[in-house]
């Protein structure tokens, strides 16, 4: 059953990790739907110009960078309607967990888990004050405990924890909160991370992410979705 969605024309949507792959495709999809898209990237000068998309510097691993980004958006636009936590890193995925470098684990957690937490801590209170908001955490099937396996150790653990954060935040906000938070598995996507053999084009999860950030007031919160349908955690 399709998710109930509202138009997002004129909505201010923050998007992390927007310089390529799924993030770039999502920026294009949101813009096509008429949203005001603010893309946070570590090096704006290296992002190809995208007409109508506001690009600002953002390092999700740095708390001050996150605060400066959010403050800048609120000062410029006056509000924040949606947040898509897409920025992520994948380090040495073939290394067995017993040989995994501590630095790889900590760096991955800093970005893939810490980034969304930092951004939500800054954005959600502002959404609550405004009386509405949508959060989408771009997770992965590799983080699903129902399908856990070997390999990709640091990345799997970070995405597993991100799913946990999604559930915790949704539970603390409550089922009737005006702010909804959900996780999404984009699938195996043809990106630098997913590789050329992947079976999905970035435009496909981009549409699904845009739908989740556009869910209506009677839509879900605290869910994990794959291809627009609820997925096993």
Image (cartoon, rainbow, N blue to C red):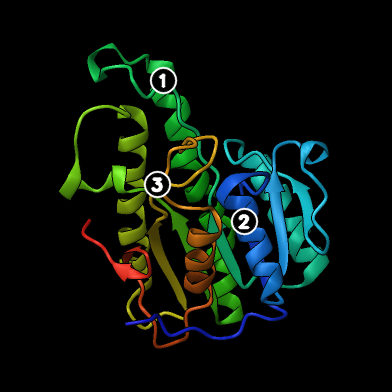
State which mark lies toward you, 1 or 2. Answer: 2
Q: As displayed, is residue 224 above or below residue 114?
A: below
Q: As displayed, is residue 218 above or below residue 128?
A: below
Mark 1 and mark 3 lie on one chain; the one further toward the N terminus is: 1
In space, the residues marked 1 and 3 are separated at their CA atoms by 18 Å
**Under tag 3, what secondary structure?**
loop
Task: Using a 10 Å C-alpha cutoff, classify the residue at mark 3 as few (fewer than 14 neighbours), some (14 to 19) or many (20 or more).
Answer: some
Disc 2, disc 3: CB below 8 Å? no
* Depth order, front residue of 133/196: 196
Tell whether 228 sits left or right of 60: left
- The residue positioned 56% from the left and 82% from the top of the image is 131
Q: Name which quarter of the figure residue 13 lies in.
A: bottom right
Residue 127 is situated, as x and y percent measured from the top left of the image, at 57, 72
In space, the residues marked 1 and 2 are separated at their CA atoms by 25 Å
Residue wearing tag 3: 188
- Residue 122, numbered circle: none
**The N terminus lies in quadrant:** bottom left
Q: Name which quarter of the figure residue 160 lies in.
A: top left
Residue 170 is situated, as x and y percent measured from the top left of the image, at 35, 67
Disc 1, disc 2: CB below 8 Å? no
**The C terminus lies in quadrant:** bottom left
Mark 2 and mark 3 lie on one chain; the one further toward the N terminus is: 2
- The residue positioned 39% from the left and 46% from the top of the image is 188
Residue wearing tag 2: 25
Task: Using a 10 Å C-alpha cutoff, classify the residue at mark 2 as few (fewer than 14 neighbours), some (14 to 19) or many (20 or more).
Answer: many
Tell whether 103 sits left or right of 17: left
Q: As displayed, is residue 144 above or below residue 51?
A: above
**Under tag 2, what secondary structure?**
helix
Residue wearing tag 1: 92
């Amino acid at each position: 059953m399709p998710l109930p969605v509202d138009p997002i024309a004129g909505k201010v949507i923050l998007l992390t990790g927007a310089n390529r792959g799924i993030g770039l495709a999502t920026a294009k999809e949101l813009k096509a739907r008429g949203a005001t898209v603010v893309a946070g990237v570590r090096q704006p000068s290296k992002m190809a110009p995208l007409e109508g998309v506001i690009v600002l510097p953002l390092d999700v691993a740095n708390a001050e960078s996150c605060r400066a980004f959010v403050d800048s958006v609120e000062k410029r636009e006056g509000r924040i309607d949606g947040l898509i936590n897409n920025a992520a890193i994948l380090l040495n995925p073939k290394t067995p967990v017993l040989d995994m470098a501590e630095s790889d684990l900590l760096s991955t957690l800093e970005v893939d888990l810490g980034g969304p937490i930092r951004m939500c801590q800054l954005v959600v209170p502002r959404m609550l004050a405004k009386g509405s908001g949508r959060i989408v955490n771009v997770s992965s099937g590799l983080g699903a405990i129902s399908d856990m396996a070997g390999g990709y150790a640091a990345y799997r653990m970070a995405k597993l924890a991100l799913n946990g954060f999604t559930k915790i935040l949704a539970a603390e906000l409550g089922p009737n909160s005006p702010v909804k938070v959900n996780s999404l598995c984009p699938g195996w996507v043809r990106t630098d991370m997913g590789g050329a053999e992947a079976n999905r084009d970035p435009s496909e999860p981009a549409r699904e992410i845009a739908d989740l950030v556009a869910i209506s007031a009677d839509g879900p919160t605290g869910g994990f979705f794959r291809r627009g349908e609820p997925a096993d955690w």
